[in-house]
Image (tube, helix red, strand yellow):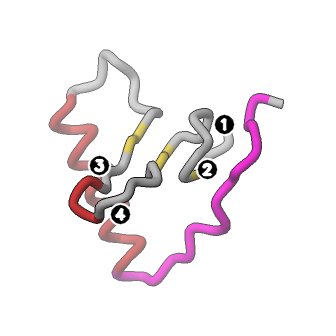
């Protein structure tokens, strides 16, 4: 599994779409299983994000190529 994020690529596991307004900015997380408990999945994603911020983990560069190729 390749974990990657992107602004324009829909094949990335985490997507931050490009929008004109900062109020319309959102994050799309595409990897949780549909049968997962949504509260537990959201809590795990939130904890992972906070851990990355607290420990200053660099997420790497955004992938703007098709990840299926």
Task: Measure how far apart labels 4 and 1 are at the Cα level.
Answer: 19 Å
Question: Which residue has dot 1 on it?
Answer: 1
Pick the front one: 64 or 24: 24
Task: Measure how far apart labels 3 and 4 are at the Cα level.
Answer: 9 Å
Task: Measure how far apart labels 2 and 4 are at the Cα level.
Answer: 14 Å
Q: Secondary structure at mark 1?
A: loop
Q: Residues within 10 Å of mark 2 (few under 14, many from 20)?
A: some
Instruction: Judge from the rendering whether residue 66 lies leftward or rightward of residue 35; answer left or right.
Output: right
Question: Which residue has dot 4 on it?
Answer: 49
The image's mark for residue 44 is 3
Instruction: Judge from the rendering whether residue 40 lies leftward or rightward of residue 19; answer left or right.
Output: left
Closer to viewer: mark 3 or mark 4: 4
Image quadrant for the C terminus?
A: top right
Looking at the image, do the residues carrying marks 3 and 1 touch, with CB atoms under 8 Å apart? no
Q: Secondary structure at mark 2?
A: loop
Q: Secondary structure at mark 3?
A: helix
Question: Which residue has dot 2 on it?
Answer: 4
Q: Which x, y percent locates residue 18?
A: 46, 54
Magenta stretch holds residue 39: no
């Amino acid at each position: 599994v390749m974990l990657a994020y992107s602004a324009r690529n829909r094949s990335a596991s985490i997507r931050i779409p490009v929008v004109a307004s900062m109020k319309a900015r959102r994050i799309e997380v595409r990897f949780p299983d549909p049968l997962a408990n949504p509260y537990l999945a959201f809590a795990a994603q939130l904890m992972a994000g906070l851990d990355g911020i607290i420990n200053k983990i660099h997420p790497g560069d955004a992938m703007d190529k098709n990840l299926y190729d």
